[in-house]
Amino acid sequence: MGASAGALEVLSNLLPALPSDYRLPILIVVHLPPDKTSLFAELMRARCAIRVREAEDKEPIEPGVAYFAPPDYHLLVEQDKRLSLSDDEPVLFSRPSIDVLFDSAADAYGGGLIGVVLTGANSDGANGLKAVVEAGGVAVVQSPASAYAVAMPEAAIAACPDARVLPVNEIAAYLREVGAR
Amino acid sequence: MVDRTEEIEIRLLLEAMFQKYHFDFRGYAMASLKRRLKRARDDLGFATTSAMQDRLLHDSAMLPKLLGYLTVQVSEMFRDPVYFRTIRERVVPHLRTYPSLKVWIAGCSTGEELYSFVILFREEGLEDRTLFYATDVNQDALTKAETGIYDLDRIKMFTENHRQSGGKSSLSDYYTAAYGRASFNRGLRQRVVFSDHSLVTDASFGEMHLISCRNVLIYFDKALQNRAVGLFKDSLARRAFLGIGAKESLRFTEYANAFAEFAKDERIYQKRSGA
């Protein structure tokens, strides 16, 4: 899942909608200024039924946990379903980068992956979402009409014309449904 | 379906690099490695990783180029100032009790972290009794570290970091600016030994009082992290210190119990007595 401008509001609607017995892990990149400490994980933790934490390097991914990329590091998924961090240069001026997360997750999960691109004012996530689709995964994009900033959803839709384009409440419903199976 | 061809090609290239040149990246974490090699491939104009491997085997000039993509990270002086502040305020008082000190900057890349430590130790009056070992696998990076020249436009950030780290002098005392570059004074290198050393294949080389190895372990897979942290453990004196990157952790390594969390948030560890 990737979000940029307007991330706080949209994630505040999405993540608390997931139940405590949720079965999928969720990996999240939010664009933040590099000097910001790990605000998001802490803000969200208090509001969510699922477990929320900041990703640690080489941590095994657990179901029902939402992992946030730490500020100023890329978050990646290894083949053995562990998390990796990197401080390689920013991609599209972003570190963490949504593309970097989606590319590596598509590699690791193939068809068992849902990529969700949310509100944002740049084009990060579009290439990554395409990689998700090419690996057999599902592309979900927040409908531009419901997004605080439309550039990121629009770029993602342009890259993945067959993506499911949904307003936030329907994304939440969809995620609840696939995570309960 | 996910196509595994590229991963196979990468493993073959790493094997070729090891067998021919003895540089061992086989234990690097695959996800980042894949991105880095893709960049190399695109920049250097190879259609496939296999084509790049072919060139690597038959043209040794490819080696330094590829090493550049695989190893070099740009760092900052006094990156994460609170790390250096904690070294200054909490680790230095312990170090003062020793008549002579050894400090190892492992994976020093182009030297930013090394100079940060030398300046900090000078400010604290410890430089004269300290020997710094600055090591990296990448010879080009080591040469840059030894030269100590950085773009002037980075100095503003270095200066601000230094100030936030509790710096007791002015960073401008340590470099000469000319032609858009800042050249750090030769005197800062008097107590430094630069050496090429691999955390993957080389052994321990002495009893250190402090090892700083930041944002290197994140590029290793779990087995290699275990090796490197084991090497650090064996290279540290009793109750000596290990500092790692702000988002790194010893928690998922075999040696988590050999270290106590000395400054948890700053990721500074102290080797336990019996370890």
Image: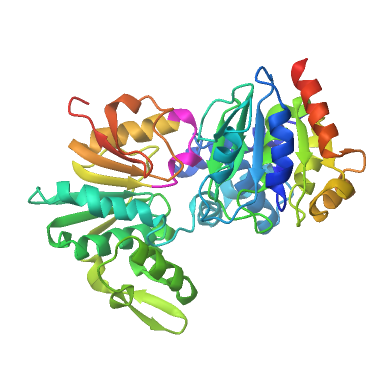
In magenta stretch: residue B217:
yes
User: Which one is in front, B118 or B135?
Assistant: B118
| View extreme (left): residue | B99
Number of marks in the rendered image: 0
Q: Is residue B24 visible?
A: no
The residue stretch that appears in magenta: B214-223
Q: Is residue B6 above or below residue B190?
A: above
Spot occupied by residue A53 in the image (x, y as percentages of width and height) = 55, 33
| View extreme (bottom): residue | B179
Q: Is residue B73 visible?
A: yes
Q: Left of B116 or right of it: where is A164?
A: right
Q: Left of A21 or right of it: where is B154?
A: left
Spot occupied by residue B128 in the image (x, y as percentages of width and height) = 13, 62
Quarter of the image containing the N terminus of chain B? top right
User: Which one is in front, B262 or B195?
Assistant: B262
Quarter of the image containing the C terminus of chain B? top left
Spot occupied by residue B215 in the image (x, y as percentages of width and height) = 44, 46
Q: Is residue A120 above or below residue A18?
A: below
Residue A12 appears in which quarter of the rendering? top right
| View extreme (front): residue | A47
Q: Residue at x 38, y 57 (%)?
A: B81
Residue A11 appears in which quarter of the rendering? top right
Spot occupied by residue A143 in the image (x, y as percentages of width and height) = 87, 44
| View extreme (top): residue | A181
Residue A170 appears in which quarter of the rendering? top right
Q: Residue at x 63, y 42 (%)?
A: B34
Q: Is residue B71 above or below residue B188?
A: above
In magenta stretch: residue A48:
no
